Amino acid sequence: MRYRPLGDSGLMVSVTGLGCNNAGRRLDLEATRAVINAALESGITLLDTSDSYGGGGGSEELLGEVLAGRRDEVVLATKFGHQDFDMGYGPAAGAKGGRGYIRRAVERSLRRLRTDYLDLYQIHTPDPVTPIAETLAALGELVAEGKVRYLGNSNFTGWQIADAAHVARAAGTTSARQPAGGPPRLPDRVEAGPGGSPDLLGGRARAQRPGCCRRGAGRAAGVRVCDRRRDLAGTGEGQRRGGGLDPDGRRPRRAQPDRAAARSGVMTVTAPARPAA
């Protein structure tokens, strides 16, 4: 397994990461345990989840139980504020990019994950209500308090990243990518990766949702574990030219994850574990 810094930061992650969106949904506790064990054995360190996965907290709860005693072995990333998912915090929590909501969301995620800090905390989708300055300020407070080490996003477009960087620079207090204990820093540039959605972390992107998985160490638990030798679904221009789609034009072809990871701005590729067919 190879390891790289995620964006322009000191956060080192495995080139292959594990997406945990199926934990608590298609994978129960024992299947999740088998997947995590297989991932750690293969050298994977990046585990990516969300408070919305598993029906609202289910994925985080399973990861918290499975990682008990092993928290320091992983880079734990989670997300908050998906506009299409209701976490049940109620209207008093406010808009999903607001200070009140972010405070409530991070405390609940920390509790479910059984940890006192998150390595990477990501805005799941843009909030059309809250000014980005308020969102960045609230997230910067979490970094200063040691509850979050790095900040990112999951579905922002390039122009939204650029806007956030401009606002952060003007405010001079909170950055789009700020390591714990370090001075505010802004992305030097914004690079639109697969899907045109760069990461807030230094403007770099993570490729997600590969079309590859094999039956691996989790087979006994009825799961499939991603094989990094197989590949990611083609995206963007490659699909439009036919290089990333099956002949019927509907399904993405599989390609080498090493090839995807070699793309400019792509630091790591993440794949979900799926139940065995």
Image (tube, rainbow, N blue to C red):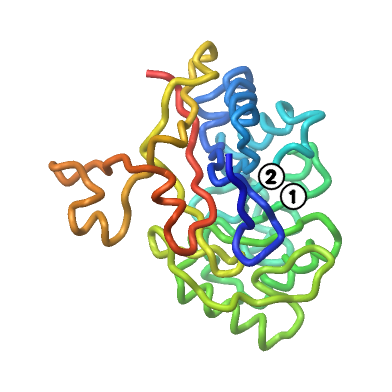
Q: Who comes first in sequence, dot 1 or dot 2? A: 2
* In the foreground, 153 or 51: 153
Mark 2, secondary structure of its residue: strand
Q: Quadrant of the N terminus?
A: top right
Image point (54%, 24%), residue name: 27
Quarter of the rendering containing residue 209:
top left
Residue 262: x and y in percent read: 44, 55
Image point (50%, 44%), residue name: 270
Mark 1, secondary structure of its residue: strand
Residue 264: x and y in percent read: 45, 63
Residue identifier under label 2: 76
Label 1 – label 2 distance at C-alpha: 6 Å
**Other-residue count near label 2 (Cα within 10 Å), few / some / many at <14 / 14–19 / ≥20:** many
Residue ranking furthest to the front: 2
Q: Is residue 250 above or below residue 59?
A: below
What amino acid is found at the position of numbered circle 1 in the picture?
Leu
